[in-house]
Amino acid sequence: MKTLIKSLQIQLNLIAVAAVAAAVVLGSRPWIALLLSLAVFGMVAWRSPSTLTANRISRTLGGLAVLITVWGTAGFDRWPLLVAGGAFTVFVAYADLAAKALNVGYLETANLDIERSVREQWITPPKVAVLVSVLGVAFGAAALATGAAAVAVDAVFAVATLAVFAWTAAGVAEGYFHRKRESHPVDGRVMTAVTRLQPKFVVHFAGARQSDYQLAMWLPYFEEVGEPYLILVRDRYLYDGVVARTSAPVVLVPAQSVLDTILPTSVRACYYVNHAVKNAQLVKLDQYLHVQLMHGDSDKAISRSPVSLMYDRVFVAGQAGVDRYHRHGVDIPNYKFRRIGRPQLHDIRVGEREKVEDARPVVLYTPTWTGLTADVNYSSLREARRIVEAILDRDVTLLFRTHPYTRTNAAYQALADEVKALIAADAARTGRPHLWGAQAESEVSLTECVNAADVAISDISGTASDWLYSGRPFAMTDPKGYRDRYLEEFPLAKAAYLLEPDAGNIEKVLDELLDTDSKAVLRREVREYYLGDHAPEELVPLFVDEVRVTCNEAPSKVATGESALVRA
């Protein structure tokens, strides 16, 4: 996605430069420069309206191209358009600063009982960015007018633009004086609404783009707790995705100073679903109990990170989660751990799945993503074609489900697309009901995929742990070439059939998965060690009870003034 955004910015800048060049060189053909400028503002409004800073150059050049064109064709005869257009071009260059000035102390919220004035509803940077884009399109369109119509069009654009600027300037001035009165201004209406809500706990969420799935997997179970709670989102690019997934109150809190003051005394505990750097900004407030949940249970390095030491409680699925830390020298005291199983597994069917007689076996293959760095790249997508071709040679149905982050790496997305094309061709040729693409990745959940499959092939990821709960056979890949060190690094794999780094033994592994299954007994033992001995119907109540207990623990911590560091 970052690559796509950068590519779009480059394209916009090139088109904007071309517009200025056309305005200067092709004065006899003004429509070329105007159409290029319209293309710039149209693309910004359509593809990335909220990126004020990133698109500053292209917007400014687009406005400049229109100004040059109007001056070259009409001189000062169209002075209202020139004056308003000049003001607009200057405003475009500093739109991000204006938006920040407008945004002083203001907090975006969703599902919170609060009323906003019209100006407050429009002072968010994304909406200012949309307004700028719309005015840019109007500016270019106005410049295309000729004859008597140009006089009326110029007047309308000038009045509209100056009205917007006056309204914006009033907001900027208001923000300026607000900051003069308060060094760290906070949105009073939001503070009042949060206090009125009286949340018992908060969920803090920050992270990379498109990471809202990490939070989404926990939201249904927080709802089951039955206590009021609040979600604090720290990054604007995550806000809309979170709001779309929940009916719980959400507040966008980008500033540390606001984070320090927004929580009322009713809050007892704070929950986290990843190791985002911004987590530390809330963890430092030791009047709350801080609980790390993570977003999946696996033997990946992130699941035994030393960063977990800073939390008061670490929720893990089973004893393996505790031993994983200690085995790697992360000496978290035992009292901090809570073994809660995995509430997300409550709908997974344990044991053989129900199927009609003589139905084909179903194989689930779930390659993970590349990770943020090469040392945690456990993706088998480079071997995926060989794996999938071997699967398709068997009389089976294939479910191919990639990780949501696969799209962040163009090379690995291309590998995934190649495999999907292979599966599509086989489905068309044989009529077998394979699932791939959106049908397997966004239209159904991972749980539904697990329940629909008889066996699985997984990379080193939380999906392997989730599959293990089903008790059915599975294999694991070794794209990094651990070989003899694999079981030492990833003990869960004792229950799996291991593929060689190049998947050269795929036929032998498929024989075990589909016919022999020599690890059935061992798999049951590993399952209990990793996920606990909990029936599906026990998993959600176990999590809910632990959240309630944790919230009730917090007052003693506040009362005694004892920090997690002291007690450790």
Image (cartoon, rainbow, N blue to C red):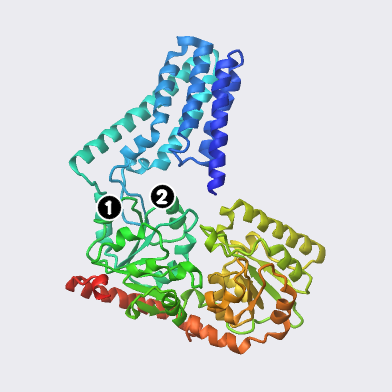
Q: Position of residue 113 (x, y in %)?
A: 31, 56
- Residue drawn at point x = 53 percent, y = 83 percent: 527
Residue drawn where x is 26% and y is 70% of the image:
565
Amino acid beneath label 2: Arg
Marks 1/2 in contact by CB < 8 Å: the verdict is no
Q: Looking at this rendering, what residue extends furthest in the front direction? A: 484
The residue wearing badge 2 is 236
Above or below, 279 against 158 in this view is: below
Q: Secondary structure at mark 1?
A: helix
Q: Earlier in the sequence, mark 1 or mark 2?
A: 2
Judged from the image, the secondary structure of the residue bearing numbered disc 2 is helix
Separation (CA) of disc 1 from disc 2: 15 Å
Q: Quadrant of residue 56?
A: top left
- Please name the residue shown 79% across and 61% down the image: 428
229 lies above or below 334: above
Residue 145 located left or right of residue 156: right
- Count of numbered labels shown in the rendering: 2
Judge the density around disc 1: few (<14), some (14-19), many (≥20) Cα neighbours within 10 Å.
Answer: some
Location of residue 220 with respect to 251 vertically, above or below: below
- Residue 189: x %, y % from top left: 26, 51
Q: Is residue 356 visible?
A: no
Relative to residue 340, is residue 92 depicted above or below? above
Residue type pointed to by label 1? Val
Looking at the image, which is closer to me, 458 or 424? Answer: 458
Label 1: which residue?
258
